[in-house]
Image: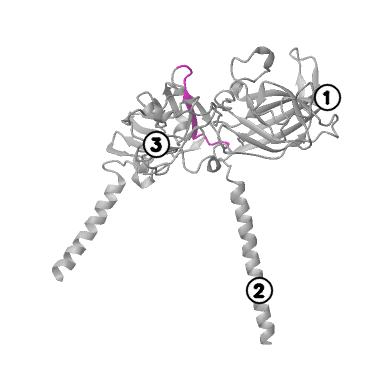
């Protein structure tokens, strides 16, 4: 009988361990799948469409187009880099609008040499100013793609590719595998190519429709966690009603040593600063951030200042400062989340568009610079900042300066979530609730302490 109970106990313990292990695996997989989830842009991604336009004697000609469907995350200079692995022994005979970075071993070909013979080619966009006979629509922008909200007309990039040693029918063609996208650094994860319905094209006179021979799509999603180990921006706060300036949290973007090594920080008074900031490197190489030595050590700081209070309005000043010596931010953007963003009356020197990540919730706004005026955020230095002011109309049912209500809930810069100060450090009203509660507590506690002190 005892052996029966002992066996039962052993079986139950094993089943319990197995159940816990299954729960752990499920939870682990769920964490992995949500790494790229963005609550303010839940459907944002970069979708690649590979359209086979015609067949050739040994393969096909295709047009590859990348669409940046991310609301506020763009790809800036030095641009995107696309890679994949061929399923068979395909080669690239020629390309228009892009090129591979290496040709590979084409020694077995005589006479007509392919553009690339590598099993895993790496493709980059051509630069502006490319001759017209080497261009197609949406190409030759140095790999730069704007975000969908900021400028949908420049949120796509295309190139044409002629593939050989491949199938010549829908049944013999094999889709490439292991797609990778750098934009320009890491962060994007691409899914497998999926064959979809052939794309249809309408002529300019809208009187005829043609279609691709075959089409497959690839979807790539972004994860800030995969892009860099530390955050890239932080937020500081101040207000007219309190002298306290709440700075970015200490080491918000990592603590670094004051050295000239890669990833270190520099003092602005360092001699020969220019030679340290821009060492000789291969063109197109992405250098790690070299930031000015600060308490927060972030490349970007966003300062939110509650500036003025009127009878029916209130005003906020936003300043973005670049502490990165190695990067000018082109086509930058800022996303802010605050309950009063549905009542913006006027914004000065920034562009603005309301974002509604969820139906009926209008508390998120995207801000970006005015073209040829402040859309270029210069590297660290006297010119390394941009600023603007926002005038809000008060909603009397919700408006208050108490408990940090006037400060943003969340700030993104160029699509990356910025580190906010802890809520209990926000500037409070001089006669606010916190002071009153503390005074009441002291008033109750003080007589008790006096009683015990004199009675001892």
Separation of marks 1 and 2 at Cα, in angstroms? 63 Å
In x, y percent, where is residue 241?
28, 36
The percent position of residue 265, horizontal first and vertical second, equals: 38, 37
Q: Report helix, strand or loop for mark 1.
A: strand
The image shows residue 231, relative to residue 49, as above or below, that is: below
Residue drawn at the location 49% of the way across and 35% of the way down: 363
Q: Is residue 416 above or below residue 115?
A: below
Q: Nearer the viewer, mark 2 or mark 3?
A: 3
Residue that sits furthest to the left in the current view = 454
Task: State the CA–CA distance, disc 3 to disc 1.
Answer: 55 Å
Q: Is residue 189 left or right of residue 438?
A: right
Q: Quadrant of the C terminus?
A: bottom left
Question: At x 27% / y 52%, what residue is drawn?
Answer: 438
* Residue 385 drawn at (x, y percent): 39, 26
Residue position for label 2: 12
Mark number, residue 95: none
Whether residue 355 is visible here, answered yes or no, is yes
Mark 2: give few (<14), some (14-19) or many (20+) Cα within 10 Å. Answer: few
The dot on residue 55 is 1
Which quadrant of the structure image shows residue 267? top left
The mark nearer the N terminus, 2 or 3, is 2
- For the residue pair 275 and 209, the one nearer the viewer reads as 275
Q: Residues within 10 Å of mark 3 (few under 14, many from 20)?
A: some
Magenta segment:
358-372
Q: Which residue is mark 3?
A: 260
Disc 2/disc 3 C-alpha distance (Å):
60 Å
> Of circles 3 and 1, which is in front?
3
Q: Classify 89 as above or below 161.
A: below
Instruction: Find residue 403 and report its image quarter.
Output: top left
**In the image, residue 176 lies in the stretch drawn in magenta:** no
Give the mark nearest the N terminus, 3 or 1: 1
Q: Is residue 352 left or right of residue 182?
A: left
């Amino acid at each position: 009988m005892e052996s029966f109970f002992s066996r039962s106990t052993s079986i139950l313990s094993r089943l319990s361990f197995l159940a816990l292990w299954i729960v752990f695996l499920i939870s682990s997989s769920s964490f992995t799948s949500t790494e790229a989830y963005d609550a303010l842009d839940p459907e944002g991604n970069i979708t690649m469409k590979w359209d086979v336009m015609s067949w050739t004697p040994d393969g096909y000609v295709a047009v590859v187009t990348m669409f940046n469907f991310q609301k506020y995350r763009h790809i800036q200079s030095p641009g995107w880099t696309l890679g994949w692995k061929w399923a068979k022994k395909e080669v690239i005979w020629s390309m228009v609008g892009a090129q591979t970075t290496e040709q590979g071993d084409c020694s077995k070909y005589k006479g007509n040499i392919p553009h690339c013979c590598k099993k895993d080619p790496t493709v980059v966009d051509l630069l502006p100013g490319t001759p017209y006979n080497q261009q197609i629509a949406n190409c030759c922008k140095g790999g730069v793609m704007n975000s969908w909200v900021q400028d949908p007309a420049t949120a796509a990039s295309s190139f044409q590719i002629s593939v050989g040693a491949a199938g010549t029918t829908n049944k013999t063609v094999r889709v490439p595998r292991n797609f990778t996208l750098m934009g320009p650094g890491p962060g994007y994860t691409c899914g497998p190519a999926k064959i979809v319905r052939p794309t249809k094209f309408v002529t300019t006179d809208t009187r005829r429709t043609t279609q691709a021979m075959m089409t497959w799509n690839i979807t790539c999603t972004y994860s800030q966690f995969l892009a860099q180990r530390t955050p890239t921006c932080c937020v500081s706060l101040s207000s007219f009603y309190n002298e306290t300036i709440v700075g970015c949290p200490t080491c918000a973007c990592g603590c670094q040593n004051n050295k000239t090594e890669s990833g270190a920080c520099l003092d602005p008074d360092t001699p020969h600063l220019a030679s340290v900031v821009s060492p000789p490197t291969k063109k197109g190489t992405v250098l790690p951030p070299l930031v000015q030595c600060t308490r927060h050590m972030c490349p970007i700081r966003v300062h939110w200042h509650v500036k003025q209070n009127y009878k029916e309005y209130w005003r906020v000043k936003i300043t973005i400062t670049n502490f990165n010596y190695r990067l000018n931010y082109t086509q930058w953007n800022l996303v802010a989340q605050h309950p009063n963003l549905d009542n913006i009356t006027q914004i000065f020197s920034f562009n603005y568009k309301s974002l509604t990540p969820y139906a009926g919730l209008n508390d998120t706004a995207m801000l970006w610079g005015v073209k040829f005026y402040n859309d270029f955020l210069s590297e660290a230095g006297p010119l390394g900042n941009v600023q603007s002011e926002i005038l809000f109309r008060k909603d009397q049912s919700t408006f208050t300066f108490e408990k940090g209500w006037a400060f943003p809930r969340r700030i993104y810069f160029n699509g990356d979530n910025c580190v906010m100060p802890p809520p209990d450090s926000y500037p409070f009203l001089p006669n606010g609730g916190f002071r009153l509660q503390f005074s009441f507590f002291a008033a109750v506690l003080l007589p008790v302490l006096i009683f015990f002190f004199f009675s001892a």
